[in-house]
Amino acid sequence: MKNIIVKANAGALTNFEVLDLLNSRGASKDTTRANDKVSGSEYKVYDYLMETAASTQTRETVTKFFDKCKDFKLAKAEILNVINLRPTSDVELTPIIEKPDEREIDIDGILALVQELLPPLPSLEAPKENEQEETEDGEQEETDDAEKEETEDAEQS
C-alpha cells in the first residue's frame, strides 16, 4: 500500500498520530532497523515517542478526549498539547493554556478529563524487587536494589 498525500499540511498532529504513522511504516516491527521505508531519524522519533504518553494512547481515547475538550472552549493547539504532554497537575496544565483565568477555563475539569480518558504515562523501568546476580563461582544469588547499588558503588571506588 502506498501512502498518498490527500491534503498537504492539513494541520498539526498529536504524538500518537505520528507514532501510529511510524508503526504503519514498520518502525516497530523491524528490530534490525534495516527497513527501507523508515529512515534513521524516524527510528529516533519512534524511540522517543515510545517513552511518552503517545505509546499508551489509542485512536479511540484521543478522539474521545478531543471531542470532550470542545466543551472547555480550548484551541486545537491547546488540546493537542494536553494530549501530547498529559499533564497531571495545574502547574503542568496552566502554561499550555493561553490566559486561562481571563477565559475562565476549568483547569480542574480538564485535569479530571485527562485522568478519566487518557491512559497513564508509560513507566520507564519497572521496579525490580529482587534481581538474580551471578556470584564469582557461577551460582545465582538474589539481591535487592539497595544491595546492588552498594556493590556497584564499591566497584567504582
Image (spheres, rainbow, N blue to C red):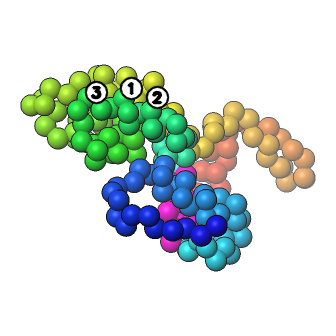
Please, which residue is most extreme toward the left here? 102
Q: Position of residue 137 (x, y in %)?
A: 90, 52
Q: Is-magenta flag for residue 113?
A: no
Q: Secondary structure at mark 1?
A: helix
Q: Is-magenta flag for residue 47?
A: yes
Q: Which numbered circle lies on residue 71? A: 3
Secondary structure that dominates the magenta span: helix
Q: Nearer the viewer, mark 3 or mark 2?
A: 3
In the image, residue 86 above or below residue 108:
below
The span picked out in magenta is 41-50
Disc 3 residue type (three-letter): Asp
Q: Position of residue 105 (x, y in %)?
A: 20, 28
State the image quarter where residue 114 is shown. Answer: top left
Q: Secondary structure at mark 2?
A: helix
- Quadrant holding the C terminus: bottom right
Residue in view at x 34 percent, y 64 percent: 9
Q: Is residue 88 visible?
A: no
Q: Nearer the viewer, mark 3 or mark 1?
A: 3
Query: Which residue lies under the disc numbered 2?
Result: 117
In the image, residue 49 above or below residue 121:
below
Q: Which numbered circle lies on residue 113? A: 1
Q: Position of residue 124 (x, y in %)?
A: 56, 45
Lower position in the chain sequence, tag 3 or tag 1: 3
Is residue 48 toward the left or the right of residue 102 in the image?
Answer: right
Residue 109 or 72: which is nearer the viewer? Answer: 72
In the image, residue 83 above or below residue 105:
below
Dots 1, 2 in contact, CB < 8 A: yes
Residue 110 or 66: which is nearer the viewer? Answer: 66
Label 3 and label 2: CA atoms lie apart by 15 Å
State the image quarter where residue 83 is shown. Answer: top left
